[in-house]
Image (tube, rainbow, N blue to C red):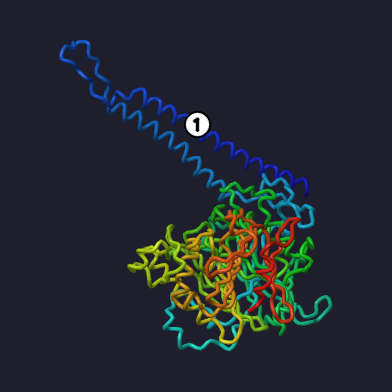
Amino acid sequence: MELVESVAFGIEVASWLIAKIDDLIVRIIGLGLLLVVAAYAWSNRQQLLAPKLSADADPSQIVFPPSRLLYLTKLGAGLAASGALLFGAYSLDELDQGAFTWPDTPAGRPEAGGTAQPGSDGATSAALPSPVPGPALLARWVQVVPAEPACSLPPWLPAAEIADAPLPDRCGFGFLVRTVLSPEANCPTVKVRYGAAVGAGAGLHSLVLRERRNPDVERYPVLVCEATLVDPERARSVTFADGGSIALSTRLHADSGPELLAIFGDTGCRDDRDQDCSGANWPFAHLAEDVAGQENGSGRGTPDLVIHLGDFIYGGGDFWAAWQYEFFRPAKPLLEAAPWIMVRGNHEGCGGDAPRGWLLFFDYRPGDGGTDTCASTDRAHLVPSYALDLPNGRRLIVTDSSNAFAAERARALGSNCGSIGSEEAQNSESRLDPKDQPGCERFTRQFEHVEYLASDTGLDWLITHVPVFAVEKAHEAKWAPKSSAMMLAASRSVGADGETGVDLVLSGDRHLLQIVQPEEIDVAQVTIGTGGVNLDPVPGQLKGTEQSMGSWDVCTDARHGMVWATLTAGNYRFAFQPLGPSAGGDCDEMLADIRDR
């Protein structure tokens, strides 16, 4: 059997290499023909010029050029042929990508080659983890999802329609089990263990997963199955047919609440920006192993809950093979170690790189009635905001900011959405463009939902992809990224200085760790876009130690890693753990001072 699998793998790799070589040959031929056409056009350019006659010219000696029509016909045919070869090769390459599923081997793509990555203890580990056992089961995970419909608000709902609707006393949460299987498979039955019963079959109950509607089987030739657990407070684990199991920490529903949370975002690989997606320059596989406790680099053990802040995939393509390579393979050990909260990033937003995959795999809404798509919506399509209550008084509010980018020149740290188009805004270097008005209104409504969902007495964490408070450059005007300019203006349209009732904002988007503490409001922003993508450059003035940027205190650390939230004496303390042999950083003190407000 191993010999057969090795031969099959060799054939698939050889087919992949032949396809790539064919594409290259076609492109070379097309480029050569284009150069020939260009040379012909230049050498015969006189064909477009009328002959110049002097007064004493002998008409019998004048040679008129051939028909311009014949010249243009030859030129057009050459350009069409070279264009067909060049652009046809790119189309063939896209078809190859859509049809090719990377072999189920630890090496993953052929170019991965088992490249090792440095561990936090100096050891090495495989670039990609081993595949899920069994030929049909491709991925499995458990998501933490809202259990109270009243604690989930659709993005189109005006604030006026929810203002008088009381929230439940508690926004409970449940567990959603999902699997990805090969298309010929059937949805599996899993075993859910309830309570503290011990023994071979004690406390086990069967749960049949149902098919989640797949609106694009051509790009996603997989079967996605799902089921929501009943009685989530008593659920302890989910076990699959191959014996694999995902533990559900009892601390998630204990009065004291979860003791350990792992938080990070922006895990995909940008091979379009000089990032090696098969080696140490893309450390997501190592991060997943480290957080899962398999490398013991953190010394903390397995987390009770994982929060992914968005941007799972960058430009690899909105099809299954890209998602499998860029997220599901490297994330496998951590997906099977603890439940996750999946936040939508701008690369998964409608108009982004991979919205179909995110809506199929991670949208928490059941798909038996029709999985959501971008087909009938515009680029601004968002998914509902929702709230989850941890037993220890923390409310997690998750909102979609996947399309929050403002105009290219907008860095409007001092404005709100109502000031767009005003004379004051037009005369300011820090402004929002009038074409940002629809987006500003949209995200103002999102922040109205956040303010509504925020509790009156508890501690509220806003979890979203794009930061509300962020600094891009050390400048007296406090320039911010164009995405955060939109978010900040929208938040200020709801509350003074961005006060929306939350105590802590956790975000990704920026490829670094950044802590921002505005002095005007009692809220802290922690940006953790350090999960694996190549890091953003940081101006020297913002690196390391805390800096005062006007009324904001800022600290930035540009290293890959994750943030741990550890429950200590009833409060959460935050610490950044970078990957690799280095430990700690100049921002540790500021991050630790945030604690849990």
Q: Residue at x 37, y 25 (%)?
A: 42
Q: Is residue 560 left or right of residue 539?
A: right
Observer-nearest of 90 and 160: 160
User: Looking at the picture, how far across and down is residue 127, in whole percent?
Assistant: 71, 52
- The quarter of the picture where residue 407 lies is bottom left
Q: Residue at x 56, y 62 (%)?
A: 509
User: Looking at the picture, how far across and down is residue 534, in whole percent?
Assistant: 61, 53
Q: Give the farthest residue toward the left.
A: 55
Residue 578, relative to residue 65: is it above or below?
Answer: below
Residue 359 seen in the figure: no
User: Looking at the picture, how far across and down is residue 316, in whole percent?
Assistant: 57, 52
The amino acid type of the residue labelled 1 equals: Ile
Q: Is residue 335 left or right of residue 86?
A: right
Q: For numbered disc 1, what is the local secondary structure? A: helix
Residue 217, relative to residue 568: is it above or below?
Answer: above
* Residue corresponding to mark 1: 29
Observer-nearest of 438 and 92: 438
- The quarter of the picture where residue 432 lies is bottom left
For the C terminus, give its image quadrant: bottom right
User: Looking at the picture, how far across and down is residue 331, in whole percent?
Assistant: 68, 60
